[in-house]
Image: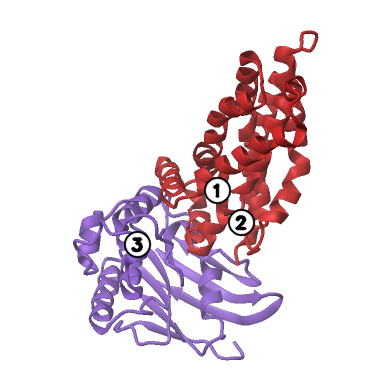
Chain colours: A purple, B red
Amino acid sequence: MRLIAENLGGERGGDAVFSGIGFALKEGQALVVTGPNGSGKSTLLRVIAGLLPLAEGSVRIEGGGEAFPSVASACHYLGHQNAMKPALSVAENLRFWRDFNGDGQLGVEEALETVGLGGIGHLPFGYLSTGQRRRAAIAKLLVSHRPLWLLDEPTAGLDKASEARFAGLMTRHCTDGGMIVAATHLPLGLDGAKGLMMGEAG
Amino acid sequence: MLALFARDIRLNIRAGGGALTGVIFFLAVIATIPFGVGPDLKLLARIGPAILWIGALLSCLLGLDRLFQADREDGSLDLLVLGNDRHMLALTVLVKCLAHWAGSVLPLVVAAPLLGLFMNMEPLGIGATALTLLVGTPAITFIGAAGAAVAVALPRGGLLISVLVLPLTIPVLIFGVSASYGATANPDPFLQPFLILAALTLFLGVLGPVSAALALQHGTD
């Protein structure tokens, strides 16, 4: 399975944010997108996921077969928001996304253990701290299987130990043949990841 | 899909408000009418079905703006849109509409017979009005979903949705009220307007979610 982006251009409100971005990812590879604020990292991720229209170029998944015909169907998108309901418990949130997304992988309790939140699944999501919320959102990546992870500032709000644990999770995802595109300005601890620097001029 | 329905129902009950705001507003509207109109029991009985329908229509519009906005604010909407290949987005919208209807509008239908007593309506008229509300209100939710999807990005979209949606709900109101009258007033037919009402609901059950899905897909930013 390969993710191929050619000559990508993205715009926000009619202004081009970046243009001429191209890369190809094979199974097991990761791409770390860096750059100053406003350089278009988040826009790039949303364009890849298909949440924003392409201004130019193309992005596609090759070899996804029946299960993953398009990038949208093959990806987990972890944006700035955690996509969890504060009124529901952590376990209810995860169980919903597991049922909705399909392709179940880890169980809810197991996923929570993996991100270090074991035993708090019964608490309403709204009671958690910022870092715990982020970790619960990361657990969402684990409960159903997607080959491609699109991560937007995934470690925002995480402490050192959780960062290291998340780096381990990402490395394991890559070893299992997954692909990662992460936008960040903090080092993620991913060895052997490709780098993409987004400048002011694109 | 069942998971989505269960989640939305649970949120509706647990977040407090959703279901109850509509019913309380409905109660407030209907309870003030007899004071405004005066103690003319015959007049109250005659305008009863129309007042119940108008009250239910306005109460339906009340909670519509949160249909997609809550999901948009916490990022869930992005993931629902991304799931388009597995669960067609129009179907996702339909399930959300049904959950919204069951959580917020069905209580109105249940409360309608009690409020019918305030209007001095006969048992037959009350039954007919409740039945037409049961069949007709889903149509309002379906049209409302299209309006809510268009206005999803606006922080104070509630009023805009009502203005957008209200003209489109007029046919539902007209056939709902005329069927309710048809049950009690002798020369008027009941079945014909009732069947048209049912047809409207089925038609909008397709058109509403499909157009809402289109609006949502092009509205992500």
Quadrant holding the C terminus of chain B:
bottom right
Q: Which residue is mark 1?
A: B89
Asked if marks 2 and 1 touch (Cβ < 8 Å), the reply is yes
Measure the alpha-carbon separation of dots 2 and 1.
8 Å
Residue at 30% in and 71% down? A132
Q: Amino acid at mark 1?
A: Leu
Measure the alpha-carbon separation of dots 3 and 2.
28 Å
Number of other residues with Cα within 10 Å of mark 2, as a class: few under 14, some 14 to 19, many 20 or more: many
Residue at 28% in and 82% down? A159
Q: Nearer the viewer, residue A9 or B152?
A: B152
* Residue A47 seen in this snapshot: yes
Q: Nearer the viewer, residue A27 or A139?
A: A139
Quadrant holding the N terminus of chain B:
top left
Q: Amino acid at mark 3?
A: Phe
Marking on residue A125? 3
Q: Is residue A143 above or below residue B187?
A: below
Q: Is residue B84 above or below residue A12?
A: above
Q: Which residue is mark 2?
A: B217
Q: Nearer the viewer, residue A57 or B59?
A: B59
